Amino acid sequence: MTLSDSSHLPQVRAQYEALPYPPRNPADESKRLIRTWLDALPMLNHHGFAGGQSFGQGFRVLVAGGGTGDGTIFLAEQLRATDAQIVHLDFSEASLSIARQRARQRGLNNIQWLHRSLLDLPGLGLAPFDYINCSGVLHHLADPDAGLRALLSVLADDGVLGLMVYARIGRIGVYQLQQALRLMHRDGAHDLATQIAHAKELLAHLPRSNWFVRAQELHHDHKMGDAGLYDLLLHSTDRAYSVDELYDWLADQHGLHLSLTDVGRGAAPYDCGMVLGPRKPALLAELATRPLRERQAMAELLGGTLITHSLYATRQPDRLARYGDTRMVPFFVHEPISGPELSAMIHRNTAQPLVMDHSHSGFSFQLDAGQYVKFILKFIDGQRSFGQVFDLVRGENKFRKAPPDDAALFADFEPLYRQLTLIERILLRRQDVPLPALAHG
């Protein structure tokens, strides 16, 4: 299918034809697999399908604005052994070409390629999709809401939408620098190469007082070559959202239910307790009484490190895997840690309270070991359900009083469970749903 030129910004399309993003070399597919946060099937299942999705029976995926293919390739690899159907859509022929080459390098044949704008989706006659990924696209449209409506038009009623848009607070320095470069190039006489040269020269001479320099540990795209630098600092159409604005748009206007999860850090940057650290101020108790969206908005302002908002959105409520069900299987993800290893760490600890410095997410928090936590963790192997784990806890330990029932064990383990799910290190799935092969590798 060919691209209609009637529904997108020509300047944006020209950028991605000249500078496909993110920059990728198809030959690198033999060396590594790039994993995209929202597209990890265990995450998608936990947040969007209540832990009950097996990804069979013709599961349909759309990667809308898939660029050079990171999300598409990761999804196709995870779904390689299934009958799932994946559609990669992008309006840049140069980006599509790179994505196709990457798929060929891996021998992936479960992808359909569409050279179209996502705004054309309502008229393409496509069957509804169970999962739609749209990462880093809507904030580059002239009318982001038109893009969202186009996506929703092809989302199944019980489907999941994975979105990433820019976050306002963490990109303050980016927008100051963008504005400076726009002033420099406002006569329109500078070609792409000259704009890039100006940006590089400016970056090399910025004073330490500049807000982009002060927050330089947050930004890395400009170190990815010309495509990354242009996308970060010279993009013609770029907007960002606060947490409040996200809820106003997605929840209030469209009735969507949101589950926010920052790349590598989960919901922790949206949690005031995590942001403020293990020594919590007394006012945290007052904040805890506020509505979730208000608490998340406060955490964004207090932390200041969110440069993007990644989230799952569903039409239906209660799509998060439910804690408290003995049939659910708890399992560890994203790091090579096991329940027995964490149990042994708690056993060895003599410090009170036990503070975990989590290097992968950058958060420190007081780990709640409870009364039975170390015994529960010992039997979490990614295959046993909570019911099976609890039976083993009761069977191995000699309790002075009556053994704790399921409700007591769930209550004791819940504080640690909440801490680990905030950083997306423990998730749930239904016992009849297998763990995808790439979940740990």
Image (spheres, grey):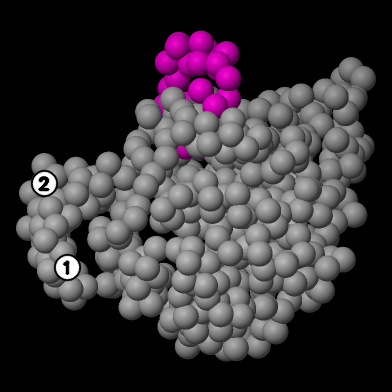
Say whether residue 33 is visible. no
- Decide which of 317, 335 is in the foreground and name it: 317
The kind of residue tagged 1 is: Gln
Q: Which residue bears the numbered disc 2?
A: 208
Q: Quadrant of residue 363?
A: top left
Mark 1, residues whose alpha carbon is within 10 Å: few (<14), some, or many (≥20)? some
Residue shown at 61% from the left, 80% from the top: 1
**Picture coordinates of residue 174, whole percent (x, y):** 26, 49
Q: Quadrant of residue 114?
A: bottom right
Answer with left or right where residue 396 lies relative to residue 49: right
Residue shown at 57% from the left, 46% from the top: 311
Q: Is residue 342 above or below residue 31?
A: above
- Decide which of 424, 240 is in the foreground and name it: 240
Q: Residue 414 lies in magenta, yes or no?
A: no
Answer with left or right where residue 83 lies relative to residue 291: right
Say whether residue 157 is visible. yes
**Picture coordinates of residue 85, whole percent (x, y):** 75, 72
Residue shown at 33% from the left, 71% from the top: 15
Q: Is residue 232 above or below residue 208?
A: below
Mark 2, residues whose alpha carbon is within 10 Å: few (<14), some, or many (≥20)? few
Q: Is residue 228 above or below residue 329?
A: below
Front tag of 2 and 1:
1
Residue shown at 32% from the left, 50% from the top: 218
| Region rendered in magenta | 268-294
Answer with left or right where residue 412 lies relative to residue 172: right
Q: Is residue 118 above or below residue 244?
A: below
Q: Which mark is residue 195?
A: 1
